[in-house]
Amino acid sequence: MSASGAVALLYYHSLFSRPPLKMIAQIFLLILLLQSSDAKEGSQFSIREATIPEIQTAFKQNKLTSKSLVEFYIHEIQKLNPIYRAVIEVNPDALHEAQRADEERKANAPKSRFGLHGIPILVKDNIATKDNLNTTAGSYAFLKSVVPRDAGVVEKLRESGAIILGKASLSEWAHFRSSNAPSGWNARAKQAVNPYVATVDPCGSSTGSAISVATNMVTVSLGTETDGSILCPSSANSVVGIKPTLGLTSRAGVIPISPRQDTVGPICRTVTDAVYVLDAIAGFDKNDAVATKKASKYIPEGGYLKHLKSGGLKGKRLGIVRAYPYFGFDNDIETLNKFEKHFMILRKNGATLIDNLEVTNYDDIQPLFIGEVIALFAEFKIALNAYLKELVTSPVRSLADVIAFNEKFANLEKIDDYPQDLFLEAEKTNGIGKIEKEALKNLTKASKNGFEKLMKENKLDALVTPYSYGSTVLAIGGYPGITVPGGYDENGAPYGICFGGLKGSEPTLIEIAYGFEQATKLRKPPPINDH
Ligand SMILES: *[C@@H]1O[C@H](CO)[C@@H](O)[C@H](O)[C@H]1NC(C)=O
Ligand SMILES: *[C@@H]1O[C@H](CO)[C@@H](O)[C@H](O)[C@H]1NC(C)=O
């Protein structure tokens, strides 16, 4: 496989297919049906589209229990998941955990005051849970393995009282196995489907995390990102994704690609929900000590919730790059036309837009980006082999074992499978050698002379990009980004608007994202056929 093949894979954004008019008519009909079926839920409290603070209020007013919430979602998963394939496993202990949360609330236990207490969450299937759920990245190679402990973020979720409802589906191995496999496909759950327009790419690799919250199969979810895997599916399925600063959230117990780029972050329907989840999972973890210690200085005293404030866009300096790939709009007139109205909204709400920014020396910076895939292949082999060694039991103990397993399995099962070209490419690497060192140096240079320079010289609070087009710039430097629903194209396919910033700028990005969301309220639930 060529490096450019992997680049094409990482920058995969085909959000523009055109379904026939008939399908559009059906969608409108289904919206009507959906509205009428929502009314059946009873006048007391409607779970669909409810935010965490609304659910917490309903708990307090005895209008809702965690048990009834979990029952509702399990019912929805049974009904909708055969269509959307966003959930790979449901936790057989979820109802029990919910009952315990209800008891804690009744007893007024201190834990019951936490924001996530009693709230069901799905975690992407590459995030380890030490319970009755498997942790497989969608691959049969992991099915009989046993993890040593909960992932760092899962430990924090449990401490905050969240209920692990199950595992979300994903592009297999977070899309680092095959460059031919479509987004949202894995051997175990098969192909996930975009709930807005079935023919449109649901994007990956946190496909199930995004679709499950979009379709109200769960309250909130966790995704992971190496390059675009939180931002892109969030954009494509009309939800909010936060890709945190590298190390703000622990990667311990997450099936790795690269410790230099991997992050874990929330995927939710609203900025509010995403910030509740970020608050719970951010912070030091002894099993990812170096990165989490370094990033914990960015966590504001008292957490992130106070940044969900009205007027958050006031005085913010937002950069727009119209003319350069990697940094924004790449002179794409159709996309720019879609976003002009958003630029106006940002201005109207008090932000200053620094438009038509120049990336100085772009021709020197652009060739540096090829280093990303060179570094990722070598880092993946090292990090995966280390992860596999830690497993309590496992049929595979090295990348070479996994490759052999896949070869045998594909022949054995005769399933629809895709070539494992990325694995084969990674297996050829031999640590961080001369070429990898050069690639890493190039990436540091690209960040310093590219994004950092652009942000600092123009005193920007955030760079505004369409969909998840800025994801590579954010990925290679470990910078944070938040995507918010930005609307729907003429076919009904969703698209997001992304705000990226320097390391530790989550508080500012949250204020901007919340300001935009509250000024626009663009998210609409998908046109689900319940019948
Ligand atoms: C985990 O995998 C095993 C097969 O090894 C399966 O029997 C079990 O049902 C899976 N667990 C869940 C919660 O789906
Ligand atoms: C590093 O960047 C130079 C351009 O400055 C490029 O020619 C070279 O191929 C890059 N090396 C790697 C390993 O990415």
Image (tube, rainbow, N blue to C red):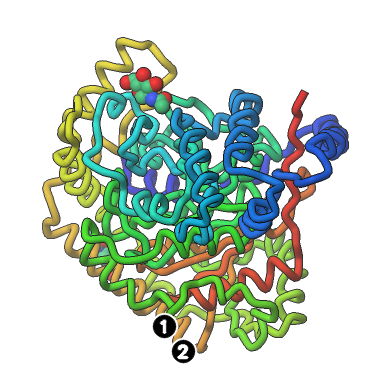
Residue projecting furthest to the front: 107
Q: Give the percent coordinates (x, y) of residue 43.
A: 83, 43
Picture coordinates of residue 481 (x, y %)? 50, 66
Residues at discs 1 and 2 in contact (Cβ within 8 Å): yes
The part of the image, by quadrant, that contains residue 84 is top right
Residue 421: in sight, yes or no? yes
Q: Give the residue type at disc 2.
A: Glu
Which amino acid is tagged 1?
A: Lys
Q: Secondary structure at mark 2?
A: helix
Q: Is residue 138 above or below residue 509?
A: above
Left or right: where does residue 393 sit relative to residue 133? left
Q: Quadrant of the C terminus?
A: top right
Q: Which mark is residue 491?
A: none
- Ligand 1 visible in quadrant: top left
Above/below status of 319 relative to 386: below
Say which residue appears at 69% left-offset and 81% top-offset: 311
Image side of residue 356 versus residue 326, left or right: right
Which quarter shows the N terminus?
A: top left
Question: What residue is at 56 percent from the left and 50 percent from the top?
Answer: 106
For label 1, the residue is 453
Q: Residue at x 44, y 32 (%)?
A: 93
Taking the spot 49% from the left edge, 52% from the top edge, the residue there is: 230
Q: CA distance from mark 1 to mark 2?
A: 6 Å
Please provide percent x and percent y for residue 42: 81, 39
Q: Which residue is mark 2?
A: 457
In this view of the protein, which residue sits in the foreground, 223 or 132?
132
- Which percent across, then down, holds residue 297? 33, 78
